Image (cartoon, rainbow, N blue to C red):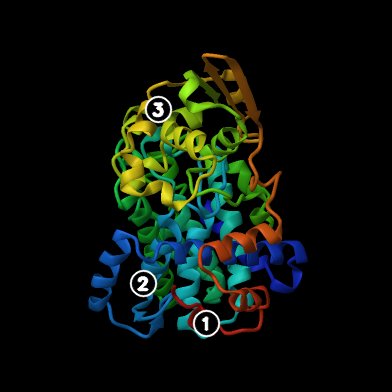
Amino acid sequence: MEIAEKIAEFINSVNYQKLSEKIIHEAKRRIIDAIAVARGALYSPPHLVNKNVVMYFQGSVPLLFGGNATPDFAAFYNTFLIRYLDFNDTYLSKEPLHPSDMIGAFLSLGSLFDLKGRDIIEAIAIGYEVGIKLCDATSLRKKGFDHVTFLQVGAAAGLAKMLKLDEKSTINAISLTIVPNIALRETRSGELSMWKAGAAADASRKAAFSALLAKFGMTGPSKPFSGRLGFINVVAKDFDSSVFNHLEADGVLRTSLKKYPVEYHAEAVVEAGKSLNVNVDDIVKIEVETYEAAKTIIADEEKWNPTNKETADHSLPYILAYTLIKKDFWLDAYDQEMIFNEKIRSLMKKITVIEDEKYTSIYPKELPVKVTVYTSKGREMVEVRNPRGYYNNPMTDEEVEEKYLRLKGRKEELNILWNMEELKVKEIVSSIKGI
């Protein structure tokens, strides 16, 4: 059976009343986390770009932290804020994903169609499940394609439920999303640009646009995955369709939150760096052992000379050197004077990163990293298997709230978000204020 058909059948089977309290609670945690990190990006350079562009997309859909736009640009605008800090949730498998990037589109169309918070929770349960199953089926990054290709399909699935599309229209929404929009991995190759966040925002925008087209009768290719020139035959011949034989609305339980504002493979690196009790002036060399994905994504050539925030948050050597010196890691680590700090740069030169095949074999069940620091006085070593926030070492609700408040959120907003089920989405969005 065509994958889009299986997804459509699954969507039709999901009902909010059947979602467990645990799934509902985790969905709320993802919404709280997404809004927290979105606020933290309010004064970022690309957000200033988007604020200038939004005047050309005037509409009635409320934006996070104020303003209005067309439905598709609202999805883009909201998602860009959620994604920019690289501080929102993550799923790691054959392909990585940041599932809460979908929430920007859910807020947009949820506001447009006067839906409630429970509709977004339902969409998260569906969208996350579809998105992570795609990530379980094949690797895009190893083929030169980007994970937002899967993000947009998950978002389209969630939106199909929100808009009450029938199975035929749902297949059209998925097809209209993926067939014209296969994203390239160049977005995340070498020195990174603002488009690292823009790719997710654009995927969210496309999902919203495609769902609206499908709702009002636009048709797309009937076999976007299995067709002769469809996704599987053209992009991913190794696609494991069997993962779609069992779909449950519990994928959100297997996703992870971030305690630190770094690419997820570096979360354990920060924890290791904070726990090492060494005088950086005594360090002779540092050896980092980790798994293939971490070495490939955050220790490739350009990551040893980051010149901007987008590259620095994907730079294992920068993140480790900064943490060893500062004994913490927060957003001020990406100030330009820090990125070019001579002491940090000098320490980076003492770092080597090695793939440990044993670690590669257990990824992504665990995210192991071992940091060995050689000093003039001896050697210190620490190993972190699963960083705080990973799905098998989750952050508490208190830690999620602490993150929200540290990013300038308000306690009264938390009360609204924890009790959002029967609130209108546009009321929720309007209640979230800027800094």
x and y percentages locating residue 141 in the rendered image:
42, 37
x and y percentages locating residue 134 in the rendered image:
53, 47
Q: Which residue is mark 3?
A: 348
Label 1, residues with CA under 10 Å away: few <14, some 14-19, many ≥20 = some
> Tag 3 or tag 2, which sits nearer the N-term?
2
Are the two marked residues, 3 and 1, in contact with CB atoms closer than 8 angstroms? Answer: no
Position of residue 430 relative to residue 232, above or below, is: below
Return the residue nearer the eye: 263 or 99: 263
Position of residue 125 relative to residue 95, above or below, is: below
Label 3, residues with CA under 10 Å away: few <14, some 14-19, many ≥20 = many
x and y percentages locating residue 425 in the rendered image:
54, 80
Going by the numbered disc 3, the residue's amino acid type is Met
Are the two marked residues, 2 and 3, in contact with CB atoms closer than 8 angstroms? Answer: no
Return the residue nearer the eye: 274 or 282: 282
Q: CA distance from mark 2 to mark 1?
A: 21 Å
Q: Which residue is mark 2?
A: 72
Q: Which residue is mark 1?
A: 431
Going by the numbered disc 2, the residue's amino acid type is Asp
Q: Quadrant of the C terminus?
A: bottom left
> Tag 1 or tag 3, which sits nearer the N-term?
3
